Amino acid sequence: METLQFAFRKILYAIPLLFGVTLISFLLMVYFGPDLTYSLIGKNPTSEQIVEVRTQLGYDQPFFIRYGMFLKEIVTFDFGNSLSTGERVSSILLRTVPVSFAVALPGFVISELLALALALIAANNRGGFVDKGIMVFAVVGMSISFLIVVIIFQIVFCSVYGLNLFPVQGWVVSNVADYIHYVAVPTMVIVFVGLGYNTRFFRAVIVEELNRDYVRTARAYGVSRFRILSAHILKNAMIPISTRVIISLPFVVIAGNLVIERYFNIPGVGLITYNAITTGDLPIVKAVVTSTAILYVIALVFTDIVYRMIDPRVALNS
Amino acid sequence: MDTQPPSSENREDPSVPEGAVTEPVSPVIPTAEASLYRSESLWTKSIRKFARDPMGIAALVIVSVFFVIACGVWAGWIGQNWSALQADGYTGMSREHWFGTNINGQDIYARTIQGTKTAFEVGLIVAVLSTVIGGILGAVAGYFDRTIVDEVIMWLYGCLDAIPFYLFVAAVAFALRDQPYAMHVAMIATFWSSTCRIVRGEVIKINSLEYVQAAKALGVGSMTIIFRHVIPNTFHILLVQGTIAFVSAIKSEVILTYLGLGVKHGVSWGTMLSESTFEVSAGIFNNFIAASSFLFLLVIAFNLFADALQDALDPKKVTAS
């Protein structure tokens, strides 16, 4: 019962957040955004046609009505048609999201797991040679730009100057072998880019747990080092770690893919968004920005509620 | 790094006052006698600690070298010929063109040097403004903890955090049309939130300290307390956050420029790397190697500098010694 109340309060708290996110998107992209009138009508329009399109776009309406129209677009998931292809934005998204997900997911999962393993090893050998080695690697990984990683991996794995094992670009997937063939290099890039930041973060969390009293008590009782790490510390460190994982999911699926999908020419949300940005295709950008932001807020609320169910110590105010 | 056992580097040995410790950075001469009654400020102690960290010093030297290069460009001494068409495209390395030329026959060395200036421009503008905004809003939110002011500020950064960064930049670019500063505005608008969050947490702790309570009891105005008593005590956080924002800004500039949202006039390492994406498949690596090595060196030096700074400024560690 209390959990239900907690969930309800959390959902209530999300409403101002959703309001703010949609308001910011609306202000930036619709209210102060570009005038779409002339993108929608053909050459040599009559003044009646111009007025008609402007009415259709709601440019003659006051602020709140237009904001309401924007909210309606979100709720009905109907963002209009793409300006460049004329296809419905919602069907574009439905087509491209699974591709982005397929590209991003393996790298994301491997990166998080590998980082957790490295962080555990580093924390277990705190101050030692292994720890220093892993942390130096993490700082180096953090310091290489995403773009440089993409270029280097492509030279090494896809070009005649390197191993030339994988396709330079594209996405022609009909079976599992194809999938692995095309997803391999993007996955390696994603793993490498995320590894540095994640390892450092996870190690900091684990080291903080290591300093707590219960660890000392367990050690005094003669519990083995491995058991303390795997059974006690990991369990307690799981809250900050899984928060980070869950709330980065919406970003990983859409935003993180912009560079990779453009560089490898993979027809996911990232590439669509990139093309929309360069051609000024507002409906697509609007749809992608707002739906990612809303997904993020939902993920945030979801994690809070799940924690409360797992760990009743999580207080309402913290 | 950030949480090492206190035994390794925190325990200072006051009987060894020679060498790096007594360099001009340290106004307090730690003789054995003085150290018994030493009442150092966080800053003098931090500087002394920083001076002992070889990694931090090396990083600072590298960053300074880059900064001198950037100043040289600002002053008009070096890297001025970055846009002139000087030779055939893709000439190799030569005495006239140290790193060769690009497709248009522009000197890559001059462009790399000019890019250093662009990087510092972006980094400094974004780091300073986002840290100032984050610091002030964080202090105000923390001071008025659990009031409507606090709620509004938290709501604001909650909303901004929800929008993915690259897409937010795209949205701002739509709103600002062809303004060259759309990238800077977007970075400042998003980077302040992490500073704000940390400062707010720290200020909530500071609020309950005696000197703030005393100032309140004496009837000092809220704004005076915030700006004179509270914010100066968060400077160590602001410094570290500023260096982190600087690094993020330089790294983001490269990605944004590649995505067509970043630097549009002038040259940056981002524009050079974007050019190089068409060249590496043809086996021409001049642009790529020049820009990426400069970028990597500056970013790793700044990262290490930020780490050393964080270690030196961590007040928990200072009190532990």
Image (cartoon, rainbow, N blue to C red):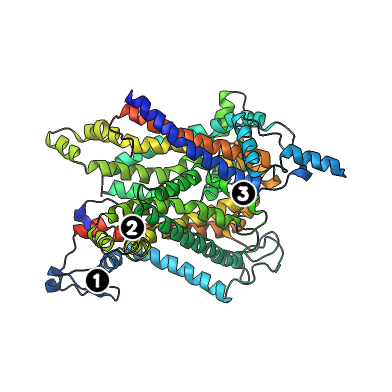
Q: Nearer the viewer, mark 1 or mark 3?
A: 3
The residue at which mark 2 appears reads as B310
Q: Specify the farthest residue to the front.
A: B219
The residue at which mark 3 appears reads as B259
Q: Amino acid at mark 3?
A: Leu
- The residue lying toward the viewer, choosing from A285 and B61, is A285
Give me the disc on residue B21: 1
Position in image of residue B314 (x %, y %): 29, 57
- The residue lying toward the viewer, choosing from B160 and A208, is B160
Neighbourhood count class around disc 2 (C-alpha, 10 Å): few under 14, some 14–19, many 20 upward: many
Position in image of residue B51 (x %, y %): 30, 67
Position in image of residue B281 (x %, y %): 63, 48
Label 2 and label 1: CA atoms lie apart by 19 Å
Q: Is residue A7 left or right of residue B252?
A: left
Q: Is residue B280 left or right of residue B59?
A: right
Give residue A112's quadrant in the image.
top left
Asked if residue A146 shows in the view, the reply is yes
Q: Earlier in the sequence, mark 3 or mark 2?
A: 3
User: Mark 2 falls on what kind of element?
Assistant: helix
Task: Tell me if label 3 and label 2 are in contact, CB under 8 Å.
Answer: no
Residue A96 drawn above or below residue B305: above
